[in-house]
Image (spheres, rainbow, N blue to C red):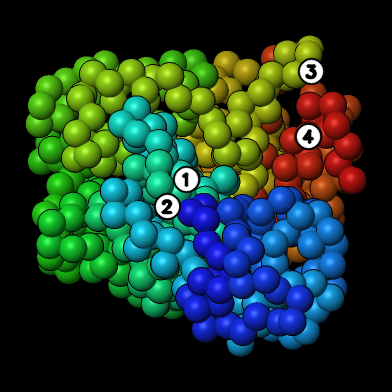
Amino acid sequence: MIPLPLARVAEITSGALNALADPSAVVRGPVVIDSRAAGPGSLFVAIKGERADGHDFARQAHDAGAVAVLATRPVEAPAVIVDDPLAALASLAAAVVAELPAATVVGVTGSAGKTTTKDLMAGLTARLGPTIAPVGSFNNEIGHPLTVLKADEATRFLVLELSARNVGHIAYLAKIAPPRVGVVLNVGAAHLGVFGGKEAIARAKGELVEALPADGVAVLNADDPLVRAMAGRTRARVTYFGRSPEAQVRAEDETLDATGRASFTLRTPSGAAPVRLRLHGAHLVSNALAAAAAAHELGLPTADIAEELSAAEPRSRWRMEVTERPGGVTVINDAYNASPDSVRAAIASLAVIGEGRRRFAVIAAMRELGEEGAALNEEFGRLAAGVGLEALVVVGEDAEPVLAGAPGAIYAPDVATAAGVLSDRLAPGDVVLVKGPRAAGLERVAEAILGGDAR
């Protein structure tokens, strides 16, 4: 973070310093929302959540070295008192970006694959200059500005993931850190119940390209009609990625190895180079192409792009993690989230990785799909059961539609039961897919199979 005196923090956030605050004291970062992460020079943002109120930990944050607390009521520590801590956080982040004209903001959105693409993109831009990117999926009104506030004078690229729970959210995030490059991956059925239809999802995702300046670049998926149509919603120049021959950045001669890792020829307007991904799943080729297209627009040579993509390892947990435990059981942990598109991709990967081996799956019903939820979850069950599984375990609430699609499946009320069901069935050489929404906590099943505890 760029150093800011408390008086300047108060000015930016339209806040008032309390009697304990020294206007000349300098915040040097980080900005944190967890008092346990506070340290010398930090700013603690006190947010009231469902389980805890950050104001109750203001003194602890200050004792740990925080210069001050961004608060909405009096606290026993130096503080900047504001009306809304999230609005203040956004204002602070926007002010920091405005002070960094040499930093290029790259925004990534889509219904699936945002985090993997962001991770790949951050690796590519790091070859061009110092890069800031969120850890995991810090992509909402809290995580987004917290990531932005990590930037300082040395930062040359901010690679940001933008999520939407409804129309207007991406536009809000884009105002905090105005993007010059905007990448739209896909429009799927994730959160269909919240948005009400794919057209509304497309409207929300397209807010990213609407935020681009005339000298910016919109990087769009040529293989997704709803994304292609966003070309008419931006002032920026448009470039396409995908498998389509019309895409300026595309994959040719794709192959998959026995572990589901893709190899292909990366074709760009400036040449071609071979790529051999270390990430698992044919669906990740599209993510790699999106990152490649953005990097190409930023000036990275094709050979360097291919080299970086081929060297990239998973950075974010529980997304197509493929691990072999002692004894030879392979676990595919894709438990971070579940949408219809990611479910189909995960099951396709299980079929490839588990070819000629006994295959198992532990799944939980997808959520936030509205009126189509029952039908989509029944399809989920049919897809999982249709790849020749030795056993399919369906976990937790709302399992009925999944079970209806897979009549031979085993129901487990919780993750501990699911892990127990599998423990006596697995043998060397077996493959297990773990796939479900984040709220289901299925990563604990994967950890239990790998030798941990599912509780």
Horizontally, residue 210 falls left or right of residue 29, namely: left
Label whose residue precedes the other's in the sequence (3 or 1): 1
Residue under the image location 79 percent in, 27 percent down:
450
Numbered disc total = 4
Label whose residue precedes the other's in the sequence (3 or 4): 3
> Residue 427 got which mark?
3
* Viewer-proximal residue among 81 and 375: 81
Residue 224 drawn above or below residue 372: above
Residue 232 appears in the figure? yes
Mark 3 or mark 4: which is in front? 4
Label 3 packing within 10 angstroms: few (<14), some (14-19), many (20+): few
> Residue 160 got which mark?
2
Q: Which quadrant of the view contains residue 77?
A: bottom right
Q: Work out how far the residue at label 1 is from the one at label 2, CA to CA, in angstroms.
A: 6 Å
Label 2 packing within 10 angstroms: few (<14), some (14-19), many (20+): many
Residue 379 appears in the figure? no
Callouts 3 and 4 close, C-beta under 8 Å: no
Label whose residue precedes the other's in the sequence (2 or 3): 2
Q: Which residue is mark 1?
A: 133
Element assignment for label 1? loop
Residue under the image location 63 percent in, 63 percent down:
25
Residue 261 drawn above or below residue 228: above
Mark 2 or mark 4: which is in front? 2
> Residue 447 got which mark?
4
Label 4 packing within 10 angstroms: few (<14), some (14-19), many (20+): some
Callouts 1 and 2 close, C-beta under 8 Å: yes
Q: Amino acid at mark 4?
A: Glu
Residue 95 drawn above or below residue 379: below
Residue 455: % across, % down: 89, 46
